[in-house]
Image (spheres, grey):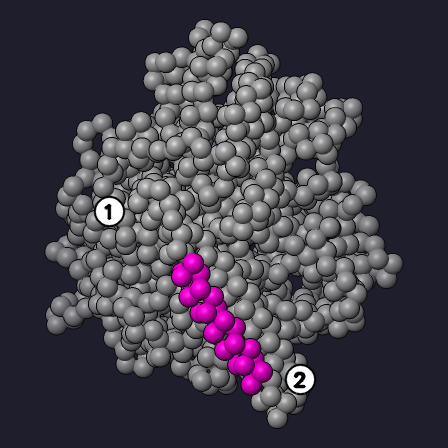
Amino acid sequence: MKRSRVLVGLVGGIFCVALMSLYRMLDLMQGAELQHSVNSPVLQVDQELSHLQQKIDRLEHLLSDNNRLVATLRNSLIHRKASWEPKRGAANVSSDTNHSQADELPGCRLAGKMKDGAVGVQLLDVYDLLPFDNLDGGAWKQGFEIRYHGNEWDKQPLEIFLVPHSHNDPGWLKTFDLYYQDQTRHILNNMLIKLSEDHRKKMIWAEVSFFSKWWNDIDDQKREMVKRLVGAGQLELVTGGWVMADEANSHYFALLDQLIEGHQWIQRHLGVKPSSGWAVDPFGHSPSMTYLLKGAGLSNMVIQRVHYAVKKHFAQQQTLEFQWRQSWDSTPRSDITCHMMPFYSYDVPHTCGPNPSVCCQFDFHRLPGGRVFCPWRIPPKPITEQNIQERALLLLDQYRQKSRLFRSPVLLVPLGDDFRFVESSEWDAQFHNYQKLFDYFDQHPKLHVKAQFGTLSDYFQALQRRLSAAGTTLPTLRGDFFTYADRDDHYWSGYFTSRPFYKHMDRMLEATLRATEILFTLTLAEMRRFSGNGRVVADFPAREHFQRMTEGRRNLALFQHHDAVTGTARDPVVVDYGTRLFRSIMNLRQVLQSSAHWLLLLDKSIYHHDQSKPFLQMDDVISAQDALPQKTPLVLSDEPRPLIIFNPTEQLRTSVITIVVDSLDARVVDAETGQPMAAQISAVWTEPSRASTEAFQFSFVAELPPLSLVVYHVSKASAGSSHRAKYIFHRRGNTPTVHTKHFQVSHLTGPDADAPLSLSNKHLQIWSSLETGLLQKLRLQSGLVRKVQIQFLWYGTRTGADRSGAYLFLPGEEGAQLYSSSDPPLVRVSKGPIFSDITSCYQHFTHTVRLLHLDGHAGRSLEISNTVDIRSEKNRELVMRLASDVANGNRFFSDLNGFQMQQRRTLAKLPLQANFYPMSSSSFLQDSASRLTLLSAQSQAVASLRPGELEVVLDRRLQQDDNRGLGQGVTDNKLTANFFQLLLEERRGGTQEVGGASVDHLSLLAHLTSLSLCHPPVTMVTQSNSKLPKLHPFRPLSSSLPCDIHLLNMRTLEDAQEAGSPSQEAALLLHRKGFDCSAAPKPALKCTWSVHEEVNLDDLFSPLQFRSVRHSGLTLLREDDHDESARQQQPSHMTRLRPMEISAFRVEID
Ligand SMILES: [Zn+2]
């Protein structure tokens, strides 16, 4: 113990000395600054401020180095302490841990650390500061007049990189395939010819989906040419994702998966690794994406679609280039150098400088006689000997103005637009004319300018060189860039919800893909162990399955494109995406079923694969790309029928499984123990008050170990033996006629007819309005009561030229109007031993809240489901609002890509539509005593427009285009389902700040609830009349993972030699969550956690054994393997999992 005290002293000492020296340095620097003299007073102040800023940046850097040092020391201290502690079943501590110990957990420690105040600019504070006055800036309409003297570059010449690019949407107005046929293949074919002609010509390419398709079409000779161009630095693959992904609606699983797919392809075929990111078209930017890019080994990135007022402010501050840091990171580990484009768009008129009418004259694709022209009515001219001086100086003036917005004399100038460089003549027009201008600059050294074609990496290398030569560091920034506005009050918050049917389908595919990846990987490992010779079972179609999975990965990846999951493509393109998602779900189900088949067989020798007669089937069918899943009624007999449940989560869970059966009486037993499970029979309602006489819902409680396949036997039971749900029906003024033969129905009469409806379980009680069936109040077992009223509302759109569409939300001035219908809703209450619920049937939606009568965490939240159909409406958006008495002020939290929580501030100075944010999985409101969390299974728009309120947009139907190029409204609405979990938690010791600190996390309970919501159990049945072999359950793990560690994926990698085949290696992706500890559920959660950052992978996944473990970058590139650590880690696979961080390993399972 003495040694640890010495160490504490040492750490403290170092920290104090470092802090004192930092203060002293700051003092000295300020003194030096004041003695400096400059000509103009304004310039003087400006320069002083900018110098001071630079010094502060440097200090910041030193401080973070210092933090890192202290963190390292602290960690080694913790590690030492741990090694002296008596060993208690690995490093895991049981759930009995009390609250004070909970604060010590890494996930909480992290949040605590950040609440102390973090370095760098927080975008939330910028929002508080900005007036959002939208002043006319002159030539640069959304900016200001930029001045320069002309001698700024005398000592350090202006260095310009003109970066040719062509933005290829993998689907928007045309489908992916049609774009490829009509445009993309010509662009890439010409690229090969033109770049090979002249080594000075360069180009960048972002979308690997298109690039790989083209690669399949070209011969070996051309492939060699491509590799030569890449090797010579003429062609650069930027970002390297399958698509340029949307950053608002996409979930981090899919964001990372499309990046893995792209990077793996690039490494395999081109042997390189992307180093710079390029995201010029996604409608707002998320730090979750930057986290993934940094983790994948990128060091720089470019973003474009940022609110024009933020751009202006950053331009004024010269902070358009910055180190983007994760809000939760107290170290610079997650920093990535980011360049934000200053102007309106990524096209040529908005990239050479502030004046689009001038810049457009340098888009030589718009020369007179072509198909495109300059809307500013001054056409480009070909560069000739006669006009070159005038042209060169005109262009240089724009370059110089633009350069004044940045801290270094290196300038990035993109040259391109959507689907550019299709024709050979366009290449020549751009390259020849620009080369003449560059040559002119070279011939006139007094201009102090060097211009050339370049790639992104050329630019960033020059930038880093110039910055370090000048001793300049870039400022640090935290936060995100939502919600985007490109002009006026045109906020792009509509696409957070547009086409919600497909946003939900996206997440269904995501869950199916993850479940299949994990089960397939485990199956291959089991097979290799079983065969004893490292081979998979001969009859198992491993290669075909791997190709199905590859297709599934690529279709999910394609859908992350910024016109796909966003819901901003044309109707036929949406159908194309939908068909791909649908087909992938079907194909992946086949892989899942045949993997489960082999794993479950007691006698593996009888395994036989027959694609036409699968042994297992899902318990539901999806009939088409635009249909919701339907449960297939199961025919029961006295013979037990096997029911197989796969738990795709890494946690032991108690779940309610519901199947549809043909019998009113059924029983289910655990096939292994013969133990009967608690069950309930409920009606299948074919209409709101008409119960099916042939089909019934059979629900039972299943205990599902982590990643297990459990077998149950379900059979017909003796008449009257099953618990049947009881129903109460109510409709104001018009008692409904209920058609049911088998269920007890009552109507509320007498004194009951005035009392609110109430449901309760062990953990919570709810009250709903009798008249509407809608929730009014929640009460926790502890006694905490919160008003939580569910309401439904309509938004309309404004009148005039600019109206809501696929991208934009432009509501009418009246705001939201309470949903009302001439007919009062039918309210149906069901009560049973397994669950109870209240359903309200309205014309446009059916809304259900359900309580499970379970002890585990599934019983602590309220399930909310809506089936929405607004096809009868015009220009309307349906909203579900929770109105509570939580005193959150104007602050609430919404998630970014399911990866992290971001604080939001509702600002009165912004229009209503600006206060809507993306919510891909969660959102919460809190005050010092309670937190109300809404978890969702799909992405949609969320807002908290008044204290205590939280509203989500469920569907939108808009008749017109919103002038962003799509050329149509959104009128392909469907019957759409959406699912939520509502969680009320008591807080103790939470932050006193109203509404919460700038960094906050979900609680562990919320994480677990979200995991269950997004990854439901998969139910499979055997063919009814087949003669059944003996089955046994599959339980790969002896215990749950610690509940803050999420198995993001276990993904089989492609064989390095044999293309299209699975290798023995898998990508193991673990995400350690940060969590809030001020909500401490009582009784405590039944899960384990580790108090250390160091964990042993063998312990974590016991009894699975890893033959090899290589810590790697997030996209699993071989060159990122930390080989040394792999060797050192043998044979015990200790590794460090930091809170909030995703860790990637290449593993081989023994
Ligand atoms: Zn685009």
Mark 2 highlights which residue?
83
**Quarter of the C terminus within the rendering:** bottom right
Q: Quadrant of residue 1147?
A: bottom right
Q: Position of residue 352 (x, y in %)?
A: 45, 27
The image quadrant where one finds the N terminus is bottom right
Which residue is rendered at x = 28% and y = 52% of the image? 129
Asked if residue 317 can be seen in this view, the reply is: no
- Local packing at callout 1 (Cα closer than 10 Å; few below 14, some 14-19, many 20+) is few
What secondary structure is marked by label 2? helix
Residue 1085 showing in the rendered view = yes
Count numbered badges in the picture. Answer: 2
- Place of residue 95 in the rendered image (x, y in percent of width and height, measured from the top left): 51, 82
447 is within the stretch colored magenta: no
Residue 862 placement: quadrant: bottom left
Mark 1 CB within 8 Å of ligand 1: no
Q: Nearer the viewer, residue 37 or 875?
A: 37
Circle nearer the N terminus (1, 2):
2
- The CA span between labels 1 and 2 is 55 Å
Q: Is residue 133 above or below residue 882?
A: above
Of all residues, the one furthest to the right in this rendering is 533
* Along the viewing direction, whichever of 680 and 466 lies nearer the viewer: 466
Query: Tag 2: Cα neighbours inside 10 Å, few (<14), some, or many (≥20)?
Result: few
User: Of the residues shown, which amino acid type is indicated by label 2?
Assistant: Ser
What residue is pinned by disc 1? 131
Left or right position of 1051 against 435: right
The residue shown at (30%, 74%) is 992
| Type of the residue with mark 1 | Pro
Please report the bounds of the magenta region as a residue range.
9-32
**SS at circle 1:** loop
Horizontally, residue 960 falls left or right of residue 1011, namely left
